[in-house]
Image (cartoon, rainbow, N blue to C red):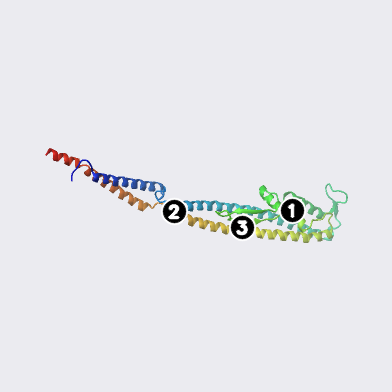
Amino acid sequence: MINLNSNNVSKMISNNLSRTKENLDSTFQKVSSGSRINGARDDAAGLATSTKLSSSSRSMDVAHDNIRKAISYLNTVDGMLETAVEAFQVLREKTVSALDVRNEYERVPGPGSRNGEYHTLYGWDFEYEMRFMQKTLFKTKDANSEIILNSGHSLTFQVGENQNDTFTVTVGDMSLEALRTRHGNFLRNWNTHNANQTIPNIDSILGELSQKRAEIGGSINALMHRANSLSETSTNTKSALSRITDADFAKETASIVKHEVMQEASMAALKQANSNKDIALTLLRS
């Protein structure tokens, strides 16, 4: 039937042409952005999943960075304890030298000494070493390390994406004053008897420092394993996110060709459908 009041075929073709254009625009957007999901209309469920995966992945990257910083910090603390071990080993060497009976009679006053404050030569050497340790042993450019070594507080690091993913390291009070309190103070007015009393104290301190270094070393190794595990998990999460969100260029290119052909066909069909009025005019003229 030929009529002028309505052209249903033209309307259907026009609707199809509009949908084809929308699909073509969406495909162009995917190709230009490289992402399959550019809005909720593309894949609502996929958008929700990808948002969660993206948040998790980014949080794990930050946690991984936290672990690297924690390892660097603990390495600093371990280096300070290593310096302390070396210093106490030097003190032990000086103590052993002071045990030589030949040094017992070489007693001299030190600079600014008070009445009766005499040491053997090795005794003053020991005293100067102690004064140097008090000023410099636990002092670094990192003020936080100094505070930690002298406070006895625990260190808690955020090593995961969730609230309770933490790692705690207890350093304890490793200051010189605390070590001397726990293991016995070092005596003044040196002689052979005092040196004999000092050696067990130094050995006890060296034992504690070595044990603490072992604990920190174990913590560093644990953090490194955690960092490796977190890196692997983050990689797998990003891979899953990529499968959900990344556009398949081969598929989208084929879709572009398909929609362009459909668009041209729809335009040709629409032109033909709109020619009904010409047929009606031809009938009138005849």
User: Judging from the image, what secondary structure is the residue with disc 2 in?
Assistant: helix
Tag shown at residue 48: none
Q: Along the polypeptide, which appears first: circle 2 or circle 1?
A: 1
Task: Give the labeled residue for mark 1.
Answer: 176
Judged left or right of residue 89, residue 165 is: left
Q: Along the polypeptide, which appears first: circle 2 or circle 3?
A: 3
**53 or 285: nearer the eye?**
285
Q: Residue furthest top?
A: 285
**Label 3 packing within 10 angstroms: few (<14), some (14-19), many (20+):** many
Q: Residue furthest right?
A: 115
**Tags 2 and 3 touching, CB below 8 Å:** no
Question: Is residue 95 shown to the viewer in this render?
Answer: yes
Give x and y (percent) for residue 74: 63, 54
**Tags 2 and 1 touching, CB below 8 Å:** no
Residue at (17% x, 41% y) in the render: 280
Q: CA distance from mark 3 to mark 1?
A: 24 Å
Label 3 is placed on what type of residue? Ile
Label 1 is placed on what type of residue? Leu
Task: Give the labeled residue for mark 2.
Answer: 242
Task: Give the labeled residue for mark 3.
Answer: 220
Label 2 is placed on what type of residue? Ser
Give x and y (percent) for residue 54: 48, 51
